[in-house]
Image (cartoon, rainbow, N blue to C red):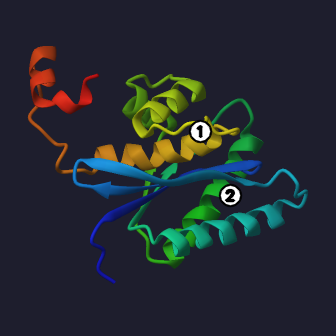
Amino acid sequence: MIHKERIILGIDPGTTLMGYGVIAVKGRDTLLNTMGVIELHKYTDPFLKLQKIYHRVSSLIEEYDPTEMALEAPFLGKNAQSMLKLGRAQGVALSAALNCNLPVFEYAPRKIKMSITGQGNASKEQVARMLRQIYKFKDMPKDLDATDGLAAALCHFYQFNPLLKQDKVKSWKAFINQNPNRIK
């Protein structure tokens, strides 16, 4: 199948809530197709959770026909057991993508936050507010894992969009001159 446009599926792995966002790329711009969460807290069996992740990610791929997937990499917090669970969730989402021959790209949480807000230590709320400003959605989602999934997709767009690649600017004035549509 030949795609006329890029469609990016972003995933924020989780075993209680898994966030996702889908964007369509139109030249230098992106359009929000959807975002949401896969709710898994009602399942007690950890393997049933993984099965639900696989089926839901597969259905997102079937419905939106993305050209690529961007995943947030798990990070080691205070609890190694949590990292293992996140790694399993990410692996299952990854398997769903690979089963459909979908190219997958992985980004560290700091990289995603930096690409959206300009700060690698931004909070979930700061990332969500910036995405709300970019995409002009009315209501903030109940679960910010949805905006985290969307952030992974937009981060990937920023990393791999040849139309955005420009010579490095040497001053704010030069940046403003090269990017008048990004200044409000």
Rendered-image quadrant of the C terminus:
top left
Residue 68 in percent (x, y) is at 40, 63
Q: Secondary structure at mark 2?
A: helix
Residue for badge 2: 88
Residue at figure coordinates x 50%, y 73% from the top left: 98
Q: How many marks?
A: 2
From what the image shows, is residue 116 above or below residue 74? above
Q: Secondary structure at mark 1?
A: loop
Residue 129 in percent (x, y) is at 52, 28
Residue at figure coordinates x 47%, y 35% from the top left: 131
Residue 13 shows in this picture: no
User: Identity of the amino acid at label 1?
Assistant: Phe
From what the image shows, is residue 114 above or below residue 46? above
Residue 182 in percent (x, y) is at 25, 30
Crowd band around label 1 with a 10 angstrom C-alpha radius: few (<14), some (14–19), many (20+): some
Of residues 149 and 14, the one drawn nearer to the viewer in this rendering: 149
Residue for badge 1: 75
